[in-house]
Image: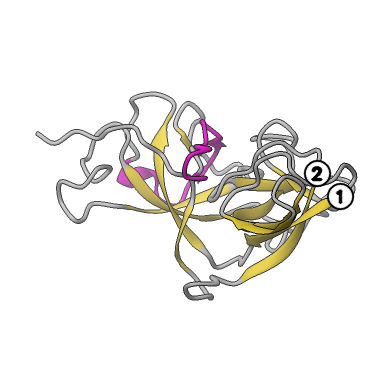
Amino acid sequence: MATNTFAPNGFSFYRGTGSSPTNEQVLAWVDAATANIFQNDPVFRLSDGTIAGVTTGPGPGTGILAGIFSTCTYLSVAQKRQVWGNYWPGSDVVAGGFASAYIINDPNAQFKAQVGGNTTALALADVGQNCQFAYGTGSTSNGISGAYVDMTVARANTATLPFRVVALITAPPGDNGTAASAYNTGIFAFNNVETKTLTGAL
């Protein structure tokens, strides 16, 4: 029987109002002192209007999502030129400066993500429920997120949870994440994001 390998890569755009390559990305700002943000990481908005992810941001379970981080551009201190990258390295901008970031916050967007945290599989009965995420460990080699849906948090109708379970991924058969067992993959939509919530973002 096929088994899944735990190898999350965050919340990758699956479908929505936008289309590739922009996927309805909008401009946001990252402060020079903000820790790494990887492509496909969920991000939060800070009180100064900038965005942040793991470490600098409020973290899962606290606050309203600003969106999903896609890419950024900044004037590199080390390279003395404008740099485009799929992740924010957490440095290389003059102190007090900012990087321009692009995030997906389309309230209709859906994302593909792997589940983890324990060996509980995402089930059909979870569709329609809300869920939490964990950041995992992003890769500084390829800039890709290590975020995943946290199965240690019960899927529930709790309004403050950030994502909604839309569907399970079952095809193509044999691909990592398609087996109906631990570390499978699903489709998730925003549940609690700035462009969708009725509560103030800050």
Main SS class of the magenta portion in the image: loop
* Kind of residue at badge 2: Ala
Residue located beneath label 2 in the image: 32
Disc 2, SS: loop
Foreground of the two, 145 or 1 = 145
Q: Quadrant of residue 196?
A: bottom right
* Kind of residue at badge 1: Gly
Instruction: Find the magenta span and give its range.
Output: 123-144
Residue located beneath label 1 in the image: 97
Q: Are marks 1 and 2 in contact (CB under 8 Å)?
A: yes
Q: Residue at 72% of width from left, 65% of height from top?
A: 27
Q: How is the image coloured?
A: secondary structure
Q: Is residue 129 highlighted in magenta?
A: yes
Q: Residue at 39% of width from left, 24% of height from top?
A: 118
Quadrant that contains the N terminus: top left
Image position, residue 112 (x, y; %)? 41, 53
Image position, residue 124 (x, y; %)? 31, 46
Disc 1, SS: loop
Foreground of the two, 191 or 157 = 191
